Amino acid sequence: MDYSVSFWNRIARRYAASPISDLDAYEQKLSVTRNYLHPEMKVLEFGCGTGSTAILHAPLVKYYHAIDVSPRMVDIALEKIEAKPMPNLTFEVAALEEFVAERGAYDALLGLNILHLMNAPQAAIEQVFALLKPGGVFISTTACLSDTMPLVRYVTPVGKWLRLIPRVQMLTFSQLLDWLQHAGFVIEYCDPPYSKHHSGFIVATKPM
């Protein structure tokens, strides 16, 4: 099993029980995201974790499919909807890189706190572009540690070796914007990272 999958499986219950670090910022991102969702949408979220955000957004769209590489994370997500099923929300254990769907199959894709944890984030952005319909929207939150915590690059190898952290890419916000635009996206909204939160929030659309 891939090391990062093992890591997320191991901490899944603790992750699910952890409070949101900045509830105001989280609510703001939810609010912005809702402006781009509508009842006829078909949505894919990759890196869904324990499904908390998927459960909040699913009632706003026609169909919401959420995937994650960690079986234990997905198990927790399924537990959350067991008592109160949501017919239009489905969860699946899958990596985006291996996910099979037709080109232009989705109206929106969400990648929340995930691109910096992927082997090839630029390739993931290009795959997202292919999966979206013309006019579709990609909403992402990404830790930009090269901007906010550059010294972390010297710590991550030790942390991975000690099995204390997952694989982490040292990305910059400008790098993300460049990759998105190179793939063909138009940037609609962006909120750069800053020292307290480290993550950049971007809404990008695929041209019609």
Image (spheres, helix red, strand yellow):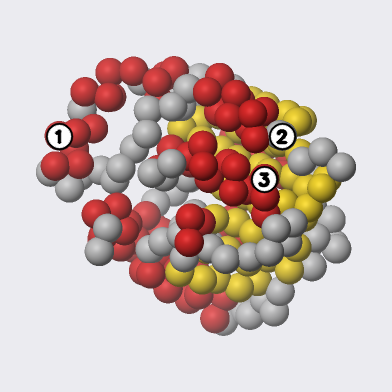
Name the mark on residue 158: 1
Pick the front one: 17 or 51: 51
Secondary structure of residue under mark 2: loop
Residues at marks 3 and 1, CA–CA distance in whole angstroms: 34 Å
- Label 2 or label 1, whichever comes before in sequence order: 1
State if disc 3 and disc 2 touch (CB < 8 Å): yes
Secondary structure of residue under mark 1: helix
The structure residue drawn at horizontal position 69% and vertical position 79%, both measured from the top left corner, is 87
Label 2 sits on residue: 185
Tell me which corner region of the image, top left, top right, bottom left or bottom right, holds residue 177: top right
Question: Visible in this render: residue 56?
Answer: no
Closer mark to the observer between disc 3 and disc 1: 3
Pick the front one: 174 or 182: 182
Tell me which corner region of the image, top left, top right, bottom left or bottom right, holds residue 174: top right
Q: Callout 1: few (<14), some (14-19), or many (20+) C-alpha neighbours within 10 Å?
A: few
Pick the front one: 112 or 136: 136
Residue 7's spot in the image, x, y percent?
A: 26, 55
Position of residue 148 relative to residue 76, above or below, is above
